[in-house]
Image: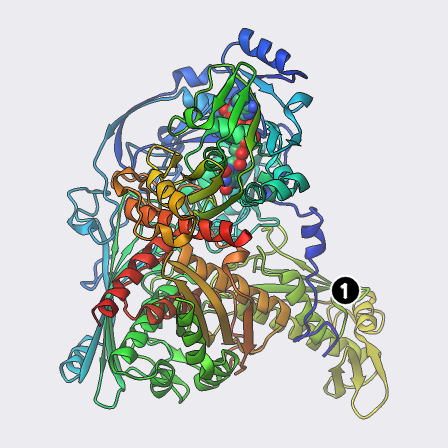
Amino acid sequence: MTATGIGAPVRRKEDQRFVTGQGRYVDDFNRPGQAHAYFLRSPHAHAAIRSIDTGLAMIMPGVIAVFTGDDLAADKIGGLICGWMIHSKDGSPMKAGPHPALAQGKVRYVGDHVAVVIAETLAQAKDAAEAIVVDYDVLPAVVDTAQATKAQVQVHDVSPDNTVFNWHLGNKDETEAAFARAKHVTKIDLVNNRLVPNPIEPRAAVGEYDFGTDNYTLYTTSQNPHVARLVLSAFIGVAPEHKLRVIAPDVGGGFGSKIFIYAEETVCVWAAKKVKRPVKWTSDRSEAFLSDAHGRDHVTHAEMATDETGKIIALRVHTTANLGAYLSTFSSSVPTYLYAPLLSGQYDIPAIYCEVDGVYTNTAPVDAYRGAGRPEATFVVERLVEKTARELGQNPAEFRRKNYITQFPHVTPVIMTYDTGDYAASLDKALEIADYKNFDSRKQESARRGKLRGIGFSSYIEACGIAPSQAVGSLGAGVGLWESAEVRVNPTGSVEVLTGSHSHGQGHETTFAQLVSDRLGISIDQVSIVHGDTDKVQFGMGTYGSRSGAVGMSAIAKAIDKVIAKGKKVAAHVLEASEGDIEFKDGQFGVAGTDRSMAFGEIALQAYIAHKFSGQDLEPGLKEGAFYDPTNFTFPAGVHICEVEIDPDTGVTKIERWTAVDDFGVIINPMIVEGQVHGGIAQGVGQALLEGAFYDESGQLITASFNDYCMPRAIDLPSFQVGMTVTPCPSNPLGIKGCGEAGAIAAPPAVINAITDALGHEDIAMPATPQAVWRAAQKARMPMAAE
Amino acid sequence: MYAFEYHRPTSVKEAAGLAGTAEDIKFLAGGHTLLPTMKLRLAGPANLIDLSQIAELRGIERSGDTITIGAMMKHAEVANSAELKEAIPALAEMAELIGDPHVRNRGTIGGSIANNDPSADYPAACLALNVTIITNQRKIAADDFFQGIFTTALEEGEIITQVSFKAPSQAAYVKFRNPASRYALVGVFVAKHADGVRVAVTGAGSNGVFRAADMEQALNGNFAAEALNGVTVAESEMNSDMHADAAYRAHLVGVMARRAVQAATSRG
Ligand SMILES: Cc1cc2nc3c(=O)[nH]c(=O)nc-3n(C[C@H](O)[C@H](O)[C@H](O)COP(=O)(O)OP(=O)(O)OC[C@H]3O[C@@H](n4cnc5c(N)ncnc54)[C@H](O)[C@@H]3O)c2cc1C
């Protein structure tokens, strides 16, 4: 290992540029002759459009063009797509309604795109948008997840009862049989609250068309620029794939919301050619609230069956998942294959059956948000396990331990094969760090001050490193989920890595360089990571589902192996030895059993000057590419323990302690991993205590700004106690499991389990705001008053 | 934002003159309420009269127990004023609870009072401290000034120049923040004056800031937190929104009032 190799807490290379304001985000790109786009959005949740009169807007100062859905249709621009086909129980395909980039005949949520104005300045575009006269026939709206199928409102013609699919997974008959013989059944009703992603950088796009070369360029805030290019070309049809360059430069956070291909970038590329000018759009925060794909929004009833020994024997779950007004790019996969396969948690549960109804409503589309399906699953499992333990009068930690999976590989009833793990090791470590044994005395001390103290566990598992292509293909994915890499060694021995992963906060420029440093024995300063440009990187699937380490870096490792293999051939010629005798170690190519060796950089130079070998026997140069397709998901798992103190007079919940013990497999950079854990927990605490996107009955988003939508702040969080256990992942060459989403997955049930422990009853929903907790504490007090 | 004419007078007289002649004017103080509304195109004044260059609107003075604060004094200046910390620490502490450092270094006492946001902190201080609001035209007692949500006694074009009050013997402000906006979900300012206790509540009332008469009466008898046990505010007069319904707000008024009295009495 080098000082900057795997396992070293190297400071992030990219931070110099970010903290000194030198980052270059999409909005920093201003192209010569650029015009500005402003989208007129629907003020109604549901309305038929009788007419759109753009006449007045067209003649306003600075206006270059005004376009509506008819203009896109006339140019045969296709609608936005959902790239994952889900089939209902009866085998029928999901009911996907049309999703035009600009509305055609109907608007379906507040913020839906009605028209676009292209003008010299943004202010002029806004002025003109105000002058567009839209004659709406306002229709009643459906917003409530649980009521969607019963409403007298139809969002899409293809789906009379607003059902997109009735999907299921698991072994139904075994599950029913197990419930029939259960000693005890625990039931729970849960709402997984809708969230707005809120990356610090709002979405943005600049479209450009070059009439000389017939090339299109799109600068866009994307987590997966190649997928954006593929969708924009092959499906939406704005430009041929080989003529479209997509650049996703520095991107300021995504959390899933920048995976998807939206109306705005589609329109910017298309309009650039129409108006013969580069066209720029930058979302403001208000637009982001309305039109970024939201996350979560499940309503679930779940039951857990246990036998007389306190062993979990079955789980059944029914979930209604709100998909919003249109199916966003990966929306259908989130409450299905990213959700139900995680319902076994860390537990050996022989029978599991899950039904999911995906529904349309007149709300913003819902898609993957940090954790995507796994936080929802973990919330179900960990709330239910906690409640079961309480009902059985068992210690929640020991109840979990008793039901842990201990033999690997373990095949769950919900199609997953867990490869490795040591759940009890994480639990033991977490109990110790959390000082669990002294919790009771802390609780008494709180009680003396009139406060309620509670402790909550979350023994989570997730599936990431998404994903084996054949497997996801058989489940309905429209793409393969491998990753690609190219390792280009320069004659001076420095290295450029071109990766299909995309960093939007993860620190790839550092961690990926650490892998190269480790394997090739050179400093990370000798390594550049190139990503986010389809003209530079040949192809890639992007970053989401904690896949950049397990999948993206595995591709790099594979390419590095090829570079080393080629280097050995070069070294054999240069060192005049047989190839089989060349060893590569600590950055040196050496001849086994001798002291003859040459440094990596010297062999790189030899590869390029090609003086010591025949170019007919061995190709000059040192550059290799690889595609890596994983053989399994990876399964990060761990135990989080949250300890809260509630002020029953005000309902304020203060998180006093947070312990996180995670098994992420091999860790490349512990400092970056801790940062991911911290950020993830903050987001999970946000969901549990603070955040919630709420629509009123008419479909207006009433949490449409930071005045009402509460993001977590530093003051809402304690100092985290982070520990690690390591079982290396056996399914990829680096042993990596992934860490990007764990905190957001683990945290919500830990918080709610702690609050319910403090209150002594289960009746609290997320977000557990002061008002909600105060009311729940009132309820908790009543039986005490009777004593 | 819509286009507007920008004016920067250097005296109150000049500002008032501009206000008298220009059409559709707005005064600009710290801009922390006005500019966001303009950016969202919810307000679009034709003429913006910036008060920031008017020296007469600045300064904090103490003569005897009378304290006078210029309308353009920023929240951070009030929070950090050595004079105020000594004479009326409750007011300095209240200013420290407003927003975040950016807000405190732009927003002004005059702007906050003129705006009379139902969740703002200063209106409660003004009522509890029995402030006199001084304008370029007259003096207005706080009791007459705040007339409901975003409504005050100010006439079109009238400029607040100062606020003035006598320091009470004991006072404290306790605020329960809206978790999202950090404005007051409920804020209670309690002040014990020579001629009686004043209790002012912001954030909670459906008609904006108000004085809690029953609480004042109870505390006039005994200026101690226990005196408020069982004293409530009417739920029917409370505001209700997604963050807090009327019952919760009414409850919080009681909790915050007791905590404010505790803080005031423990200060000695
Ligand atoms: C993020 C954020 C958080 C905030 N948090 C809080 C909080 O916790 N508590 C709180 O109380 N406030 C809060 N505020 C409001 C802030 O404190 C400002 O005080 C308030 O916006 C008004 O003051 P200003 O100086 O910015 O006035 P401006 O925005 O400039 O003006 C407001 C209104 O008052 C008028 N006006 C201004 N000065 C005068 C004058 N001298 N005479 C007559 N009319 C005048 C203006 O014409 C305008 O109509 C917050 C604001 C923001 C942006």
Residue A458 image offset from top left, x and y in percent? 40, 73
Quarter the C terminus of chain A occupies: bottom left
Quarter the N terminus of chain A occupies: bottom right
Residue B208 image offset from top left, x and y in percent? 38, 33
Residue at which label 1 appears: A526
Q: How is the image coloured?
A: rainbow
Say which residue appears at 51% left-offset and 10% top-offset: B23
Viewer-closest of A399 and A421: A399
Residue A464 lies, with reference to residue A589, above or below; the image says above
Residue A459 lies, with reference to residue B128, above or below; the image says below
Viewer-closest of B77 and B40: B77
Pick out the residue farthest to the top: B21
- CB at disc 1 and ligand 1 closer than 8 Å: no
Residue B191 image offset from top left, x and y in percent? 48, 41
Say which residue appears at 43% left-offset and 20% top-offset: B153
Q: Residues within 10 Å of mark 1 (few under 14, many from 20)?
A: some
Query: What is the tally of numbered marks visible in this picture?
Result: 1
Q: Mark yes or no: residue A550 visible.
A: yes
**Residue A413 found in image quarter:** bottom left
Say which residue appears at 55% left-offset and 73% top-offset: A722
Label 1's element? helix
* Chain of the residue where label 1 is placed in the rendered structure: A
Residue B16 image offset from top left, x and y in percent? 58, 12
Q: Mark yes or no: residue A275 visible.
A: no
Viewer-closest of A448 and A384: A448
Kind of residue at disc 1: Gln
**Residue A427 found in image quarter:** bottom left
